[in-house]
Each structure stands twice: as structure tokens, then as C-alpha cells.
């Protein structure tokens, strides 16, 4: 495992602070209430957003469609190396979101960069769905190995997470000849019309887009901190699973017409929600009873993020179909839908793609997986994740506004509330914390209505973890003082 972020050559090293605890904000009264000194050195050139950033934001808003930005803060990214990103003015930050979960091996890992550069000289594109090339075969073989289950599998390569979901929906309908699907409240599966039909994490993502694809019904996810059924675990005895059989399948959704369930093993955009241990096992048993496929969306939780190649492995369940993307391509667009071989019985031409699984994406992906294995990044995700959760559990005791902390490996969420008694969601405070942390040199983002996520590249070391957490903790205190 690499012990430090990959450092590029820098001709001009402008101003470099060696900071204790507060990273960007130099403490006025010494370090905080800890003896720990994080040896993290981040470059700070100016107060963000700097002049160049402001200029790019102005040009951006004149030409690009409005997206989420500047929902969190106006961060104009210029470079990245390891777990560090640098803005256009030269300020450095610790990346606590991995570029929306896509940079698991860190930014610009030299081996990924080399694989991309080498492949760019050989072949950029030739569409593997109409012709053949070895890069797709090699990636398919690797994906067969790293996904759960030792049975024969087949792989469809595409260009994004949403496309991996589209392929799943089509192949599941084709194979089963059943039209319906079961999905979950809080789920995020992408924004293309098919994928959007499964997404249910925020109303703004769906409003004015109906009708989406018909045939998808949603049931509540196992969100024990805020059980939608107002039950308490473990006394509930997994009522959220039994409800499906007792009500959904008996009242309005014929199980014999249901092709597949689609579920995130750990819910991501919905708030980094970890279901209880037996949840997936029970759900799988129920789906098996009705001959319904079990499909997991590992777009965000896969590729070692939770300490396993696929997060579902943490729950001892073998799915029928796995959707992957984000970190799969090591920074290049790539999606994959991996299923039991017999499911892929669709006729040639039933589903194809032009630029899915390009040679460059395949090589970047294979290099990414080699690095995860060679540098033991899954193991590091577990080690750093356990340490982070230990620190966060202290926050729950210390701070009234920290409601719940949860996660697996380096997929960790912190839920912000108004107070412990009411548990009322405080999205504004979560937003403020993220904003304060950015000013201190940490790029964190939200999840759900009132959470922020801690999801750094898997190669992050303890020093950087501590420095990032210290900045977040200081931000929490500042927001509480308001
Ligand atoms: C779990 C999950 N599925 C699917 C997607 C959609 O991926 P993409 O944005 O590549 O279409 C996302 C994106 O955040 C995701 O988190």
C-alpha cells in the first residue's frame, strides 16, 4: 500500500503550511483539545474561492447547464494526486468524497495513467458489441472473478452507472418475461428514464419527469435510525422484509410478474445507510421463494470501498446480477452489468452500445483492480474505516447535533440533527459543516437530506484521515456556536 499520496513534480512550490489540526485555518489559540499533531502539509495560496476560481465559475454559469453547483461550495478543480485535489488557484484539499466515489485508488495513480497512455497509443475505440477486442474479454474475465458466486457469469459493458442499470432492467425483463420490479425509498440508481424509475432519493430528481418507466414499485429501505414503520431493531424482527410478502405481494404487486428486486447493499445518496446484518439474507430468501432475481447496485459501494470487491459480500448474500461503475473505470467512463450466464439469453441485437467498454476504459479498469490488490486497498479501507468510526462514535457522545454515524470500510455517513431528543433533520447544519470544512481544506459532500459522507480514496493514510476529521470536527463546533 502506498503510504503517501502520489506526488507530481512541482516546479513552483508556492506557499506550504505545515498545519496542526486545522489545516487551512491557522489556529489562533494553538491546537485543539488533543495532543495529536497531524503531519499533513497542504498548500494554501488564497482564501477559496480565489480569483481564478471566481472567473471560471462565472464562465461556467454562462455556458453549462445548471447542475448541483454551487450546492456545496464553488470548488474549481485543476489537479489531483493521491487523496489530494488542487483548485485552480493552487490551494490543496483532502478529498473526502473521491470525486463522487470514482477515485478509489487515488487521483492520477501512475499505473492507471500509464495504462491509459499506453492503450491510447494502441487503440482508442472499436465497439466491442459489434467487433471483438481482448481488452473487453480480459475485463469480463476479471469481473467474473471478483463478483460473488462461483457460477458461470456474463458481462455487459457500458459507459456509466445509469447505463449499467438500464442493461440490468432490460436483461431481467428479457430473461424472466416478467414486467415488474421492486425498488426502495431513498434509492439512487441514476437519472436516465429507466434508471430514474428506480431512483427515489430526492423529489427534485423526479419532479416534472413523469411518466417514467412503468412497473417499478418502491418499499421502505431498512433505515433503522429512522424506521419508516416506527419500529425498533431488533424487536421489529425485520418487519420491513415481512411487509413485502404480507402486503406488497398480496395487495398490489404480483410476485409471479416481478422480474427482479434492485437494491443498494448500503444505500449511498439516500444517506449512507447500512441495513442490519440479516436484512439482505432475509430479502434474498423471500425473492428466491418467488423466483425473483436479486440485483445489487454496487455502482458506489463496489470496487473495494467497503473492504470487499462488492458490498453485498459483507452480508453473506450471492446476488444474481451486479451493476458496477464509478471506480470501476479508474476515472474513465465505464459501467458493467454482471449476471448469471443463463440470464444473458437475450437475442443478439437486443441491447448494444457504441462507446461502452472502450479499450482505454477496460485497461484503466484492469490497472485499477491490480492496484487495489497489490496495494491492499480493501484491507486499508477496513482499517481506516474502523478508526474513523471509532472517532465518530466519540462525536455522537460529545455533540448534540450528531445523530447517527454508520458505515462499512470507507463508505461512512454522519447524520446531522437539531437535537438528540427530537432527532429532527438539520440539512442546513450539515450543509454549513461541509462548507466550513471546505474552507479548512477538506472536500466533503452531503448524502440524504441531512448527512455528510466520509468516503476518501482507499489509499488514504492515518495522517490524512486525522487531518480531515479534525477539520470536520472543528467545523461542527463552529456551526454549533452559531
Ligand atoms: C448507487 C448508484 N447507482 C447508480 C448511479 C448512477 O451512476 P452515473 O452517475 O454514472 O449514471 C449512482 C451515482 O451516484 C449511484 O450512486
Image: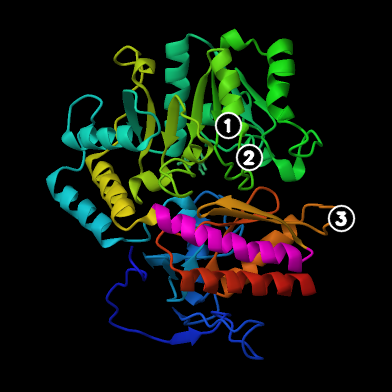
Residue position for label 1 = 280
Using the rendered view, name the quadrant where residue 435 is placed. Answer: bottom right
Quadrant for the N terminus, please: bottom left
Q: Is residue 215 left or right of residue 326?
A: right
- Rendered residue at 51%/64% (across/down): 57
Quadrant for the C terminus, please: bottom right
**Are the residues flagged by discs 2 and 1 in contact, CB closer than 8 Å?**
yes
How far across and how far down the image is residue 99, in percent?
A: 46, 56
The number of callouts visible is 3
Q: Is residue 416 left or right of residue 290?
A: right
The residue nearer to you, when weighing 71 against 390, is 390
Measure the C-alpha gap from mark 1 to mark 3. 30 Å
Residue position for label 3 = 421
Say whether mark 1 is within 8 Å of ligand 1: no
Badge 2 density bin: few <14, some 14–19, many ≥20, Cα 10 Å: many
Say whether mark 2 is within 8 Å of ligand 1: no
The tag earlier along the polypeptide, 2 or 1, is: 2
The tag earlier along the polypeptide, 1 or 3, is: 1
Q: Is residue 482 visible?
A: no
Give the magenta part as a residue range: 378-400
Compared to 182, does 333 lie above or below?
below
Q: Which mark is residue 275?
A: 2
- Rendered residue at 68%/36% (across/down): 222
How far across and how far down the image is residue 77, in percent?
A: 44, 65
The residue nearer to you, when weighing 355 against 218, is 218
- Residue 387 is a magenta residue: yes
User: Dot 3: what SS?
Assistant: loop
Main SS type for the magenta part? helix
Using the rendered view, name the quadrant where residue 415 is placed. Answer: bottom right
Say whether mark 3 is within 8 Å of ligand 1: no
Using the rendered view, name the quadrant where residue 343 is placed. Answer: top left
Amino acid at each position: 500500500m502506498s503510504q503517501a499520496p502520489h506526488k507530481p513534480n512541482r516546479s513552483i512550490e508556492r506557499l506550504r503550511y505545515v498545519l496542526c489540526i486545522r489545516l487551512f485555518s491557522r489556529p489562533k489559540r494553538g491546537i485543539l483539545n488533543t495532543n495529536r499533531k497531524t503531519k499533513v502539509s497542504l498548500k494554501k495560496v488564497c482564501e477559496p474561492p480565489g480569483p481564478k476560481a471566481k472567473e471560471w465559475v462565472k464562465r461556467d454559469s454562462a455556458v453549462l447547464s445548471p447542475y448541483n453547483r454551487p450546492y456545496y461550495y464553488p470548488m474549481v478543480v485543476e489537479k489531483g494526486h493521491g487523496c489530494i485535489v488542487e483548485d485552480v488557484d493552487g490551494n490543496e484539499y483532502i478529498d473526502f468524497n473521491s470525486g463522487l466515489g470514482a477515485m478509489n485508488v487515488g487521483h492520477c495513480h501512475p499505473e492507471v495513467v500509464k495504462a491509459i497512455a499506453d492503450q491510447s497509443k494502441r487503440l482508442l475505440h472499436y465497439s466491442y458489441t459489434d467487433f471483438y477486442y481482448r481488452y473487453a474479454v480480459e475485463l469480463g474475465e476479471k469481473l467474473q472473478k471478483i463478483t460473488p458466486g462461483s457460477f458461470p457469469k456474463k458481462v455487459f459493458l457500458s459507459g456509466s452507472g445509469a447505463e449499467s442499470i438500464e442493461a440490468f432492467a432490460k436483461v431481467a425483463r428479457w430473461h424472466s418475461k416478467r414486467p415488474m420490479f421492486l425498488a426502495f425509498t431513498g434509492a439512487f440508481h441514476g437519472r436516465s428514464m429507466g434508471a430514474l424509475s428506480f431512483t427515489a432519493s430526492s423529489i427534485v430528481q423526479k419532479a416534472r419527469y413523469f411518466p417514467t418507466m412503468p412497473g417499478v414499485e418502491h418499499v421502505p429501505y431498512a433505515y433503522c435510525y429512522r424506521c419508516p414503520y416506527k419500529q425498533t431493531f431488533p424487536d421489529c424482527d425485520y418487519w420491513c422484509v415481512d411487509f413485502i410478502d404480507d402486503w406488497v405481494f398480496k395487495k398490489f404487486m404480483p410476485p409471479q410478474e416481478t422480474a427482479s428486486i434492485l437494491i443498494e447493499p448500503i444505500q449511498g445518496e439516500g444517506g449512507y445507510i447500512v441495513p442490519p446484518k440479516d436484512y439482505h439474507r432475509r430479502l434474498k430468501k423471500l425473492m428466491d421463494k418467488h423466483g425473483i432475481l436479486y440485483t445489487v447496485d454496487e455502482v458506489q459501494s463496489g470496487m473495494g470501498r467497503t473492504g470487499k470487491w462488492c458490498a453485498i459480500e459483507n452480508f453473506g448474500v450471492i446476488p444474481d446480477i451486479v451493476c458496477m461503475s464509478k471506480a470501476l473505470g479508474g476515472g474513465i467512463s465505464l459501467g458493467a452489468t454482471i449476471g448469471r450466464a443463463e440470464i444473458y439469453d437475450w437475442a443478439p441485437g437486443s441491447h448494444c452500445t457504441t462507446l461502452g467498454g472502450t479499450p482505454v476504459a477496460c485497461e484503466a479498469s484492469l490497472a485499477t483492480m491490480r492496484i487495489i490488490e497489490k496495494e491492499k486497498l480493501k484491507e486499508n479501507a477496513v482499517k481506516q474505516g474502523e478508526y474513523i468510526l471509532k472517532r465518530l462514535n466519540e462525536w455522537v457522545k460529545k455533540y448534540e447535533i450528531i445523530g447517527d454515524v454508520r458505515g462499512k470500510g470507507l463508505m461512512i455517513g454522519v447524520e446531522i440533527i437539531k437535537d438528540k431528543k427530537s432527532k429532527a433533520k438539520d440539512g442546513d447544519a450539515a450543509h454549513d459543516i461541509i462548507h466550513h470544512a471546505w474552507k479548512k481544506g477538506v472536500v466533503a459532500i452531503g448524502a440524504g437530506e441531512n448527512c455528510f459522507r466520509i468516503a476518501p480514496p482507499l489509499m488514504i493514510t492515518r495522517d490524512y484521515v486525522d487531518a480531515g476529521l479534525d477539520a470536520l470536527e472543528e467545523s461542527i463546533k463552529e456551526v454549533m456556536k452559531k
